[in-house]
Structure formats: structure tokens, C-alpha cells
Amino acid sequence: MDRKPVVIGVAGGSGSGKTSVTKAIYDSFKGHSILMIEQDYYYKDQSHLPMEERLKTNYDHPLAFDNDLLIEHIQKLLRHEAIDKPVYDYAVHTRSSEVIHVEPKDVIILEGILILEDERLRDLMDIKLYVDTDADLRIIRRLLRDIKERGRSMDSVIEQYVNVVRPMHNQFIEPTKRYAHVIIPEGGHNHVAIDLMVTKIQTILEQKSFL
């Protein structure tokens, strides 16, 4: 098989709605050959570090990610080879012993805050999207998510946002917007932009005779 799968990158800050955009695109192609790869699964293994060192991990910094492994896995999928996607255990701040077996598909959606930061990753993408949402909405969404889903206090979420998330966003994430082919304001609520992206992906697939 010589037809290379289509790779779509979806970037954006924490709470921007990039996961909603990714899911909307994915759901539009249900029944077709499509898969999602989340950058969050590719945080570096820290099993060699003591817990007090792991607790200092800055998950919003480019160096937190094992991009070498992520790139290797994308390249394998592009060669129509299966991969074993790692699983990250936030309870112990290191990679789990579990993996998720992933079979190659015709469309690969790569989603994460910093997927456009690494030139090697960008070069693997056919379409690069950046989900752009105002900072006040992003912090509100992050507050609601972390309190509801992760059992955190409001004070701890705000402290982390002010001291880590916001400066990392301004330094590393926001600048990657310039690499995007398309900037989608307001994330998953922007149905027009999502519909346009779905149509574009369908066109690419038809040109490659996938559909």
C-alpha cells in the first residue's frame, strides 16, 4: 500500500477547546478509517526519578514530552505499521506499564498543546490547526475541569495557572499559532470552521482514493 495516511495536527492552549474540535472531526468520520493520537500520552518516563523530583514536572514545557517516541510512532503509522501507545499515570507522575495497541488508519489526528512547537512533528502534518480561545475562557474551563474531574482546589488551580500555565502558554504555545494553516476561534463552538475542515479532509481523502 503506497497511499500515505493524512495527518491533521490540532494545537491550542489548555482549555482552548482543541479536544472538542478533535472529537468533532473524529465523529464526522465515524465509519471511516481514523484514529487519534494525544500528545498527553507521550510525557517522558520518569520512573528513574524520586517522587519529589517527579512532583516538580512542568507539564506545559516542551521538554516534558518524549517527542522522539511520538515522531517514531507517527512515522510507523505512516508506513502502515501498528504501534503500542504509552499511557501516562498522573497519580505517580510517570509512564504506566500499560500500553494501548493502535492499528494504522487512513486519517491520523494528532492533538496537543505543543504539537506545532517541534519542527519535526510539523513536517509530518498535512493540515495544521490552532484553536484560539481568549485567556479568560481558558482559565474558567480549566478551573471547572480540574475541580470536577481531578479533585483539585480552586486555589491550587489558580496558583498553577498564574505561575506555570500562563507563562508557558505565552512563551511556547501562543507563538506556534504562526505555523497553523487554519486558526479556529472559540474551539468546539465554531461549527462553521469545523465543517470547513471536515470538507477539506474529505477532499484530500477523495484525492487519495481513501473514500
Image (spheres, rainbow, N blue to C red):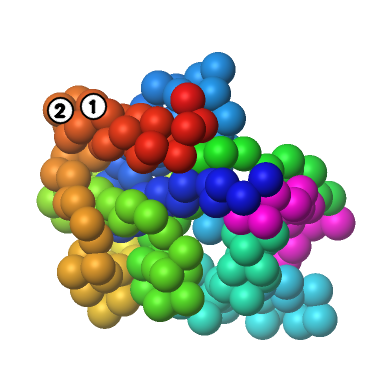
Percent position of residue 189, x then y: 20, 29
Which residue lies at the image location 42% right of the left edge and 70% below the top edge?
A: 123
Q: Which residue is mark 1?
A: 195
Q: Quadrant of the N terminus?
A: top right
Q: Which residue is mark 2?
A: 192
Percent position of residue 9, x then y: 40, 53
Percent position of residue 184, x then y: 18, 45
Residue bounds of the magenta highlight: 78-97
Judge from the rendering whether residue 127 lies leftward or rightward of residue 152; answer left or right.
left
> Is residue 13 shown to the viewer in this render?
yes
Which residue lies at the image location 40% right of the left edge and 22% below the top edge?
A: 28
Of 78 and 188, which appears nearest the observer?
Answer: 78
Which residue lies at the image location 14% right of the left edge and 44% below the top edge?
A: 185
Kindly indicate whether the residue at mark 2 contacts the one at mark 1 (C-beta within 8 angstroms): yes
Judging from the image, what secondary structure is the residue with disc 2 in? helix
Verify whether residue 43 appears in magenta.
no
Of 161 and 74, which appears nearest the observer?
Answer: 74
Between the C-alphas of marks 1 and 2, the distance is 5 Å
